[in-house]
Image: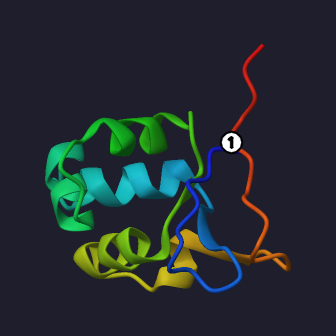
Amino acid sequence: MNIVKNPRAIGGLWMELRDRKMLQRLMIVQDVSNRTLAKAAGWRSHSYMNRLVKGEVKTLEPEPALRIAKFLGVGVEDLFLTHVSDFPEREVKKKETA
């Protein structure tokens, strides 16, 4: 799981994209590019948005998820699942590479 620990997040809060195809459809219907949506999410680069759309990653921090949903005019719960770690002092591991 590709999760970046957010030291401000209480209990290790993160969001998971429910359905990348739904995100893709919304972007196509609204004529929104990966770059535009990444900018709306508050990201400097569009590379992580590309990875979300391709299904290479599924998780992101809450603030960008909220911004994405608002920009697309849908409820956050329509696009994302909310996860909270029970162990705030424990760093959520990044995907291990061998």
- Residue reaching furthest front? 89
Amino acid tagged 1: Lys
- Residue reaching furthest right? 86
Residue at 36% in and 69% down: 64
Task: Specify the quadrant of the image occupied by residue 59.
Answer: bottom right
Residue at 38% in and 81% down: 74
Looking at the image, residue 27 lies above or below residue 14: above
Task: Work out which quarter of the rendered image holds the N terminus and state it.
Answer: top right
Looking at the image, residue 81 lies above or below residue 34: below
Residue at 48% in and 34% down: 54
Q: For numbered disc 1, what is the local secondary structure?
A: loop
Q: Position of residue 97 (x, y in %)?
A: 72, 20
Q: Give the crowd class for mark 1: few <14, some 14-19, many >=20 residues within 10 Å.
A: few
Task: Work out which quarter of the rendered image holds the C terminus and state it.
Answer: top right
Q: Is residue 41 left or right of residue 44?
A: right
Identify the colour scheme used: rainbow
- Residue reaching furthest top? 98
Task: Specify the quadrant of the image occupied by residue 35.
Answer: top left
Residue at 55% in and 54% down: 4
Q: Position of residue 28 (x, y in %)?
A: 26, 50
Q: Position of residue 62 (x, y in %)?
A: 48, 75
Q: Position of residue 30 (x, y in %)?
A: 20, 61
Q: Of residues 88 and 34, which is closer to you in this image? A: 88
Find disc 1 in the rendering and name its residue.
94
Looking at the image, residue 3 lies above or below residue 69: above
Task: Specify the quadrant of the image occupied by residue 84.
Answer: bottom right
Q: Report the label total.
A: 1
